[in-house]
Amino acid sequence: MTDIPVAIADTNALYRLFTPKDPRHTAHQGALARAGHLVVSSMVLTELGYLLTSRIGPAAAMNALDFIAGQAGARGSRSSTPHHTSGAPWP
């Protein structure tokens, strides 16, 4: 079995990755290149979209989210949605 490096991305890291003027941008690019599998929660994506839209503009947010979605598709990743089977409605 081959070990695949896994990185769990937080909003700060992704924001720096998609902000070329950030002083740590290059370091975050290198970290992403070394990650074999990147885990990003829906909450992080939501916050990233908000921050990029409000600070840089909607095009920056769309480019970042499109890039992340493209990487997921290229690697054959699957997303999962929380669900329950009790039959009771969500709170």
Image (spheres, rainbow, N blue to C red):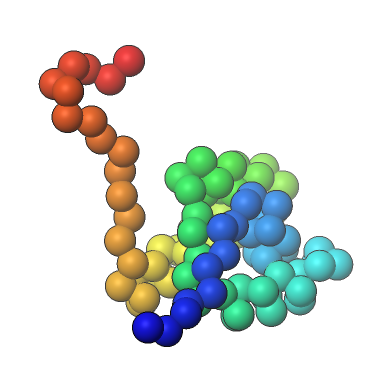
Residue 62 position in % (x across, y down)? 50, 57
- Side (left or right) of 45 relative to 87: right
Residue 88 position in % (x across, y down)? 18, 16
The answer to which quarter of the image holds residue 75 is bottom left
| Residue toward you, 39 or 29 | 39
- Side (left or right) of 73 relative to 26: left
Whether residue 82 is visible here, answered yes or no, is yes
- Residue 45 position (above or below residue 83): below
Whether residue 46 is visible here, answered yes or no, is no
In the picture as drawn, the residue positioned furthest to the front comes out as 1
- Side (left or right) of 66 relative to 81: right
In the picture as drawn, the residue positioned furthest to the bottom comes out as 2
Q: Quadrant of the C terminus?
A: top left
Residue 73 position in % (x across, y down)? 33, 70
Residue drawn 39% across the image and 67% down it: 72
Residue drawn 17% across the image and 29% down it: 85
Q: Quadrant of the N terminus?
A: bottom left
Residue drawn 30% across the image and 43% down it: 81
